[in-house]
Amino acid sequence: MCAVGVNLPQALPVIRLLNLKKPISKTRQNKDGMTALHIAVAARNYEAVQLLIELECSVDLVDNEQRTPLHYAAEHGYPEIVKFLLRQEVNDNENRSCLMWAVCAGNIDVINYLIQREDAPKRADRDKHGYTALHLAAMVGNEKICTILTNQGWSLSERDNHSNTALHLAAGRGHTDVLRCLLSSGAAMNEEDEIGRTPMFWACMGGQSHTLHCMIKELGFEWRSPGKTGARPKTDNFGRTALHAAANAGSSACINVLLNIEQEDYVLSSPLVSCLDINGETALHEACLAGKFDCVLSLIKARSAANAFGRLGRTPLDCAEKYEQGPQSMLIIDYLKSEGALTFEELRIVAAKILQKHWRNRKTNRLEALKNAKK
């Protein structure tokens, strides 16, 4: 195996000699599952590759990750070796084809060669996650490859196993230029994933504040929709807003982007910080669950209710105390208490005392009224 990894003319006679003495060496695999042909391809030793094929070394043996020598050639961008090896193709353990590896590695020469062949890869081919080549190009943030693929007929509306489009994946990774590219090619900006989240939500979940700002202010992504009594922020299937998503991700930068945009928009029926999910909880609950002090600080400063609670019977303080996430938890707990925050049980006790006082006062007033009436 060492001989094939040496890109020198003297290596070829050594390979022939070794094959005569140990024919099995051409199929033997190292600890990573690589054969001599894998190593020759990785070393870009074209003459050694040709010789190994001449010696009938198998082109479809796979390494521990189920990659053939052809996958290596595509990943490293060796078009001359790709052309030589393209007799048959075996997908890896992610079910990713040679083209997909070339896309992930950004090897445009290999991509162009593969898509221009008569037996070019099918546009709808997917890996085990449901990603097409365009999904992968969007994920790695390669605008040029996205353009090549869309021009060659890759669909902008194809969805992965969780119903995400390429636009969702680009937004979640902060690839703003790819977003522009996909939109200019006709991508629908407000498509929803399997639980009703638009690409804007994905930018929040990925903590991509710059991309989020560009999406709303420059590219025109919708963050609210009109209603009878004023606009309401867009929500997912669980009633969560983009602010909930940003808080859950622990991104104070995205929280601040949304709050600043809200300040410029006076048509919301209620403040973002007051919006409730289907459990009746606010973004502050999410921030406390995530254990992110800077997010809690931003939301409290924006006048989020410190004692809000929903049908799960927990306040933000309950969330901070019950789901401790590290050293920031005590900071959050102390800060919430300084802002008058109580647990749900403490609220219940306070409410009971208020009711008792109210009924005592009412009873006293009635007795006094009766005494006055007798006089």
Image: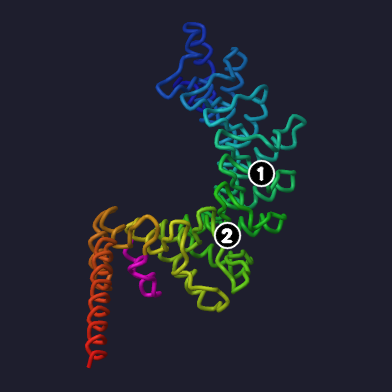
Of mark 1 and mark 2, the one earlier in the sequence is 1
Asked whether residue 335 appears in the rendered view, the answer is no
Q: Which mark is residue 158?
A: 1
What's under tag 2, amino acid-wise? Thr
Please determine whether, in this image, residue 299 is positioned above or below residue 78.
below
Rendered image quadrant of residue 134: top right
Of tags 1 and 2, the one toward the viewer is 1
Which secondary structure lies at badge 1?
A: loop
Quarter that holds the C terminus: bottom left
Left or right of 332: which side holds 149?
right
The foreground one among 291 and 116 is 291
Residue 164 at what x, y percent from top left? 59, 47
Q: Could you tell me which residue is drawn at 26 percent across and 82 percent down?
A: 366
Residues shaded magenta: 292-308
Residue 307 at what x, y percent from top left? 33, 68
How busy is the neighbourhood of tag 1: few (under 14 within 10 Å), some, or many (20 plus)? some
Distance between the Cα atoms at labels 1 and 2?
20 Å
